[in-house]
Image (cartoon, helix red, strand yellow):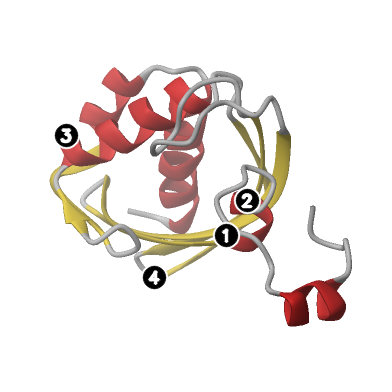
Amino acid sequence: MSLKENKAIVRRFIEAYNKRNLDVFDDLVATDFVDHTHQQQGLEKLKKIFHAAYIGFPDLHETIEDIIAEGDKVWARLTYTATHTGEYLGLAPTGKKITTTLIAIYRIVNGKIVEGLFFSDQLGFLKPLGAIEFTEKGKKLFSEEVK
């Protein structure tokens, strides 16, 4: 696969989950896909992660800011926005709108995404949902920069 083709696969993947069309994953993702971030393996487990996100954040949307390919890997810097209007990981809806950055690294073999590694601003994501609170020292260090 060319670098251009690999980037097109990642673009189609992101477009598919933005449109809630996870059936397209069958064409783009290997059945034994490895998610290094969530320490899971398998296409169906990947789909379950997205289904849970759609329940908690029905308007979840990712925008590609940068996309780079090298060899069999594609890196994407994404901005995602979502409003917490449903239960997510046991957290009751807060109505809070989240905007954060995600760095995703995909490995592609024979036209399929076989591995993914994802880095995001978990502090900026979890704090507005009430999942974490700063200690007194943290409040002094960060004031209200992370809401």
Q: Residue at x 65, y 29 (%)?
A: 94
Q: Nearer the viewer, mark 2 or mark 4?
A: 2
- Residue 64 vs 108, above or below: the answer is above
Q: Give me the C-alpha separation between circle 2 and circle 1.
A: 5 Å
The three-letter amino acid code for the residue at tag 3 is Glu
- The residue to which callout 3 is attached is 44
- The residue to which callout 4 is attached is 71
126 vs 52, nearest the viewer: 126
- The residue to which callout 2 is attached is 125
Q: Nearer the viewer, mark 3 or mark 1?
A: 1
Q: Residue at x 83, y 81 (%)?
A: 141
Q: Quadrant of residue 98?
A: top right
Q: Give me the C-alpha separation between circle 3 and circle 1.
A: 24 Å
Label 3: state its secondary structure: helix
Of mark 3 and mark 1, the one earlier in the sequence is: 3
Label 2: state its secondary structure: helix
The three-letter amino acid code for the residue at tag 1 is Gln
**Disc sitting over residue 122 in the figure:** 1
Q: Give me the C-alpha separation between circle 1 and circle 4.
A: 29 Å
Image check: 111 left or right of 57? left
Q: Residue at x 48, y 36 (%)?
A: 91
In percent of width and height, residue 45 lies at: 19, 40
